[in-house]
Image (tube, grey):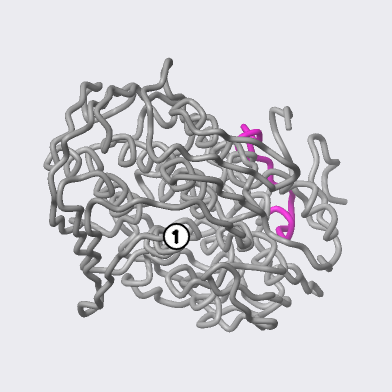
Amino acid sequence: MTAANLTARRAGPLRGVVRAPGDKSISHRALILGALASGLTEIEGLLEGDDVKRTAAAMAAFGAGVERLGEGKWRVEGRGGFSEAADVIDCGNAGTGVRLIMGAAAGFDMAATFTGDASLRGRPMNRVLKPLGEMGASWICRQGGRLPLTLRGGNLRRIAYTLPEPSAQVKSAVLLAGLHADGGAEVIEPEATRDHTERMLRGFGAEIEVREAGAGRHIVLPGGQTLRGTRIHVPGDPSSAAFPLVAALVTPGSEVTVQGMLLNPLRIGLLETLGDMGADISVTNVRDEGGETVADVTARHSELEGVEVPPERAPSMIDEYPILAVAAAFASGKTTMRGIGEMRVKESDRIALMAAGLAACGIGVEEEPEALTVVGAKRGNHLVAGGAGVTTHGDHRIAMSHLILGMAAEEPVTVDEPGMIATSFPGFVQMMRGLGAEIGEDLPATV
């Protein structure tokens, strides 16, 4: 996609059955653990977005054999660890990728230099560097823990680390470093976060203990373990599936089914919230694939009501708040989202950008440091106005969320820098067009 801008306009009902791209979180972890393991790891359903491709290239740079066999089918030949890369590791826009890779690389006696695009270079890495430093790693970087960054690993010691804020990325970095630390690692999380790393470590043959502790958990990984290559089937990404599902909810007459969607209990916060809002959503064909629960999820146009989203739900849906804000724009009453300060340090300040974009489209918003309130426009037959050009700052979720808004608004909505959508959802535009959406570079004004 090379267009400078993309515009979505109101069209007919959205109908059809689609499959979401592979889960990005699981795709990153599959490649990294495959490279750390001994032997072959065969992956099906890998997300082939730019972020994951950067991780694949990084694993090859660290000495693993990485081969694409076909669409979504990859093979990783692990050497049991990382060897020093000959060049800088460029992670592009992949925040998850760089943080997890730094954790894995810290376990080896070598130096590795990491960089990324302008957005990633502006994102702080201190949350990951702090525990890695306590384990014995060292680094040189720009002020504020920003890339470019050179990390020196090896000779790590055990850590028992309490997460200061919910973060699956920090937890995973510590566990990956702990694989090659003297005595392993323990992570205490006061609030449970997505557990793909723990599940996948077991799949690669590791011993790992997870104990519930109130709303959180203790995760203990003994040291001195060897991972073995395995087979992985990557389920559909719920963060990506959210876009066609919400589009169906807000577009009259619509019914859309997303097949093979991940239903990990720590990733279903959006579905729970949409249910609280009165969404007509059904879940069928529930099954287990590779240790994860997946199902087919159908959404139908619904009259939504504003809600107060429980702040403790944030870790299970932090990437879905932008599209939830769009659903809230078409609801009756206010929807308040609290405990979402993490959104300000994603690819962009997502609270600020969603507030600005919604306001430009005629929606009432109230922005706070760690909260966003959306005043739904649904009053009788009144619709969301739309008719705005939205600045995305290169954030793929901001772009996709506002394009979904434009599909059901009175006037078209245009977003800039749409090429970044490919970082997480290659084929987004084609999928939505296949369901009946009108998205293009120069769409005519609504008649």
**Tally of marks:** 1
2 w.r.t. 332: above or below: above
> Magenta part of the protein: which range?
406-421
Residue at 79% in and 35% down? 441
Q: Is residue 419 magenta?
A: yes
Depth check: 11 or 44 in front? 44
Instruction: Give residue 215's quadrant in the image.
Output: bottom left
Residue at 64% in and 66% down? 246
Question: Is residue 412 in sight in this rendering?
Answer: yes
Whole-percent x, y for residue 236 in the image: 63, 61
Could you tell whether 71 is left or right of 308 in the image? right
Q: Is residue 353 magenta?
A: no
Residue at 47% in and 64% down? 374
Instruction: Give residue 442's quadrant in the image.
Output: top right
Question: Is residue 356 in sight in this rendering?
Answer: no
317 w.r.t. 141: above or below: below
Residue furthest toward the top? 86
Whole-percent x, y for residue 220 in the image: 22, 64
Whole-percent x, y for residue 427 in the image: 74, 46
Depth check: 434 or 246 in front? 434
The amino acid sitting under disc 1 is Met
Whole-percent x, y for residue 326 in the image: 57, 61
Depth check: 291 or 65 in front? 65
| Quarter of the image with the N terminus in it | top right
Q: How packed is label 1: few (under 14 Cα within 10 Å), some, or many (20 or more)?
A: many
Could you tell whether 7 is left or right of 279 in the image? right
On the image, numbered disc 1 is attached to which residue? 200
Mark 1 element type: helix
Residue at 61% in and 50% down? 42
Could you tell whether 157 is left or right of 281 in the image? left
Instruction: Give residue 341's quadrant in the image.
Output: bottom left
